Image: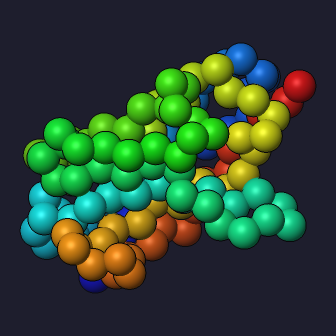
Amino acid sequence: QVQLVESGGGLVQAGGSLRLSCAASIRGFSRYVMDWFRQAPGKEREFVAGIVWSGGITGYADSVKGRFTISRDNAKNTVYLQMNSLKPEDTAVYYCAARRVGISLHDYWGQGTQVTVSS
């Protein structure tokens, strides 16, 4: 059974850091593009960052560029999101998702992990 399990969320003060992890039980994990999304209360889910299997190509939302870093360890079937200089507006439930290269729809989603940034 395919699973994406996020961890690492929590409560942090503004300016602090958190590292999210997403452990994937997907056959052929290295062939998937892994993305992070977030959804704040009352808002639509938005793209945060993505990484292709080789790790050489990454993409970020403008709101997190320079503060967040996405990485992956294909040997561990895990993708990470290092979040620095956190702001209250980063408060949201963060989800990881997997999609095949060249396909825009995601095959798999995690259950989400809550990140709360206090001012």
Residue name at image x 76 percent, y 57 percent: 40
Q: Position of residue 74 (x, y in %)?
A: 15, 48
Q: Is residue 29 above or below residue 59?
A: below
Q: In this image, 67 relative to 31: left or right? A: right
Q: Quadrant of residue 103?
A: bottom left
Residue name at image x 31 percent, y 38 percent: 71
Q: Is residue 49 above or below residue 66?
A: below
Q: Quadrant of the C terminus?
A: top right
Q: In this image, 9 relative to 106: left or right? A: right
Q: Quadrant of residue 31?
A: bottom left
Q: How is the image coloured?
A: rainbow
Q: Position of residue 110 (x, y in %)?
A: 47, 67
Q: Position of residue 83 (x, y in %)?
A: 54, 30
Q: Is residue 13 above or below residue 110?
A: above
Q: Is residue 59 above or below residue 42?
A: above
Q: In this image, 90 relative to 21: left or right? A: right
Q: Does any portion of residue 80 appear in the rendered image?
A: no
Q: Does any portion of residue 60 appear in the rendered image?
A: yes
Q: Total label count?
A: 0
Q: Position of residue 88 (x, y in %)?
A: 81, 34
Residue name at image x 37 percent, y 52 percent: 50
* Residue projecting furthest to the front: 62
Q: Quadrant of the N terminus?
A: bottom left
Residue name at image x 63 percent, y 39 percent: 63
